[in-house]
Amino acid sequence: MKFGGSSVAGAERLGRVADRVLAARNLRPCVVVSAMGRTTDALFAAAHAARDGDVDTALATVAPVLGHAEATAGELLGGADARATAAIAAVRDELHVLLRGVAMLRELTPRTTDTIVAYGERLTTLLLAALLAQRGAAVAHVDARRFLRTDARFGHARPQREAIAALVAEHVAPQLDAGRIVVTEGYVGATAEGHTTTLGRGGSDWSASLLGAALRADEVQIWTDVEGVLTADPRLVPEARPIPVLSPAEAAELAAFGAKVLHPATMQPAVDAGVPITVRDTQRPEGAFTTIDPRGGGRRQGVAALAMRGPVTVLTMTSTRMLATSGYLAQLFAAFGALDICIDLVVTAEVSVACTVEPDAPLDRLVAALAGLARVDIARDRAIVAAVGEGLRDAPGVVERACRALSPTNPELLCFGGNDRNLSLVVPREHAAAALQRLHAEFFPAEPARRAARNPAHAGAVGRPLEAQS
Ligand code: ADP
Ligand code: ASP
Ligand code: MG
């Protein structure tokens, strides 16, 4: 059972998490938690202030985080839990030493950053473990660094699954076998030398899946603040609705194209182990939820959901040398590889290639490296709007309907057919939300009962040029 940042933000919510866990007691739950609310953001901000030599700001930035943890402990545990209070005080001391050290040196390495930000998850485990114990459960806090072995790519470390399987068997399974509820940190791991690492933002979902796979769990439950994976991000499309079943490939594709509800790497470990993933709402446990079925999809054909990601930068590389030569694309993309620039979407035409890259890619260096090979035109502030679903390539009329929904505006770039489950459209970023809403209205038309409640502003938006809506 993994509980995300909003699910554990504050005493009341942590209380509800404890209810969920205790209700599942007979299933021998292993619980993975994120940092509370915006704690991770605050820890990054404090580390950056310290790097800039501003120790006062750094300490002032972590103060509310620690204050909140103390207040939560007081409220939840009646202030009587001396161990939790002492543990929070120890976190405070350690963070202060680290931040002062960074400020003194004015140097912040990725390794130090990971050590600092990992305290967010630690605060949650210590509160939840204390709460479960107070409610009479047998609980074991197992530090994630004891079993979540990773490489040393600090900030986006890659898990080492064989080592994790052995370490989980050694440190986690015996606790569960002894009838204890295990509580551990998401997002956090360690190298073989014991240096703290993190899996990248949103990585707690991935932790849960790695742990679920290693334990051969019956199910990996991702508890969050929405009723499963919806047909679009509800913050952008309020009428988005829950999807009962997704294939792992659909879920991974959605996550890669911006659906923040799951970290894109979450699916693989669980699927490899044949473990289903469910996405559930902590506030509404009886409500709708999504099952990601490791045996795949194949139930329907067409658009399952929409996602949006941006900003991205579109590069158009033009050269007459491309005409009827072999090996040209290899030369072009070698320059991207040398600069560690990831290419996302690619489309080629007779003498040009267009692709999307992350907005922070080192484009000056790329343009210099491509001098003599191609002229590069750069279009910043674009976004990718993607429709995802098994069998999309063969679903009748999908491209036509998508383009009609955006009409009269054309997508700047259209990628289709690269696999069987993705249609990606690139639009100016300021038009992306409107484009998403119009695609949603096309592929998920409101049911009659919903139509009356539909936002009139949104209904009116359909059919006008995208430019006129933003
Ligand atoms: P947690 O802290 O529990 O990990 P996140 O904030 O990382 O939660 O992810 C949940 C959020 O993902 C939702 O509040 C929602 O706004 C966003 N989201 C984006 N796309 C989707 C989608 N297709 N379905 C559901 N939620 C989505
Ligand atoms: N706390 C981490 C983050 O904010 C990991 C997570 O929430 O999954 O990115
Ligand atoms: Mg998340």
Image: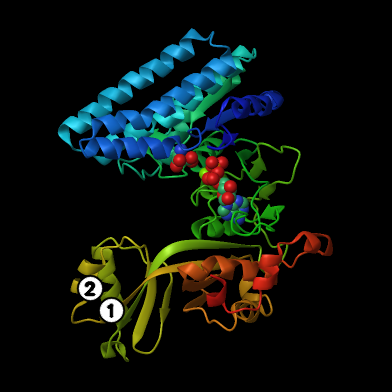
From this view, report whether residue 216 is shown above or below residue 291: above
Q: Is residue 116 left or right of residue 295?
A: left
Q: Are marks 2 and 1 in contact (CB under 8 Å)?
A: yes
Q: How is the image coloured?
A: rainbow
Query: If you read the primary sequence from the N terminus, does the residue marked by circle 2 or circle 1 appear first?
Result: 2
From this view, report whether residue 201 is shown above or below residue 318: above
Mark 2 belongs to which amino acid?
Val
Structural crowding at the residue carrying mark 2, measured as other residues with C-alpha within 10 Å and reported as few (<14), some (14–19) or many (≥20): some
- Residue 385: x and y, percent? 53, 67
Q: Residue at x 26, y 23 (%)?
A: 97
Q: Which residue is mark 2?
A: 367
Q: Is residue 416 left or right of residue 86?
A: right
Examine the rendering and report whether any part of residue 327 can be seen. Answer: no
Q: Quadrant of residue 137?
A: top right
- Residue 235: x and y, percent? 59, 54
Mark 1 belongs to which amino acid?
Val
- Name the residue nearer the viewer: 395 or 439: 439
Mark 2 residue element = helix
Q: Residue at x 25, y 82 (%)?
A: 374
Q: Quadrant of residue 364?
A: bottom left
Give the quarter of the figure containing the N terminus: top right
Q: Which residue is mark 1?
A: 376
